[in-house]
Image (tube, rainbow, N blue to C red):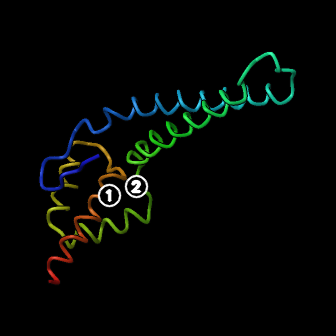
Amino acid sequence: MKIKISGQPDPDIFRDRKKYALWFAFFLVGACVSVGVAIFAIYFDTHHYKNLDNWAIGTLVGSALGITWFGNRLQDYKKLYRPHREKLVALRSNHPEIEIYCAEVETIGRGLIQAEYEAFIEYSERHSAASCA
């Protein structure tokens, strides 16, 4: 997710969260089904089902990749916790662009999310390095 601090905050930043959550749930169900099929293949007589164990492992690997991909996308939507908010106070006082962005987000009436916080950290590091050079 790309956050531009110099621009206006996106009022509909959560539009993709539902899609990511649904895909995450789909792959999680796929992983559970593949584990169930693997348990069935291990404990029951499945010699007449060719490659059932291979299908279970393949489905598990594919589901694990989907869980990882969409789970990482959902991490961007986490709310900020106390240590993040405390550091954000310092960032807001040191960088007027971050202060303006946060004020506009508060005007919209939504809370800041993890992706925005990480963009603030990156912005702060980039401008601190530029001012030291």
Looking at the image, tell me whether mark 1 or mark 2 is earlier in sequence order.
2
Tell me if 116 is positioned left or right of 95 in this view. Answer: right
Asked if the residues shown at circle 1 and circle 2 are in contact, with their CB atoms under 8 angstroms apart, the answer is yes
Query: Which mark is drawn over residue 80?
Result: 2
Seen at 59% across and 37% down, the residue is: 61
Q: Nearer the viewer, residue 63 or 74?
A: 63
Give above or below for 110 relative to 87.
above
Seen at 30% across and 67% down, the residue is: 89
Seen at 38% across and 48% down, the residue is: 76
- Between the C-alphas of marks 1 and 2, the distance is 8 Å
Tell me if 77 is positioned left or right of 34 in this view. Answer: left
For disc 2, the neighbor class at 10 Å (few under 14, some 14 to 19, many from 20) is some
**Dot 1 corresponds to which residue?**
117
What secondary structure is marked by label 1? helix
Seen at 50% across and 33% down, the residue is: 24
Amino acid type at circle 1 is Tyr
Give above or below for 52 relative to 123.
above
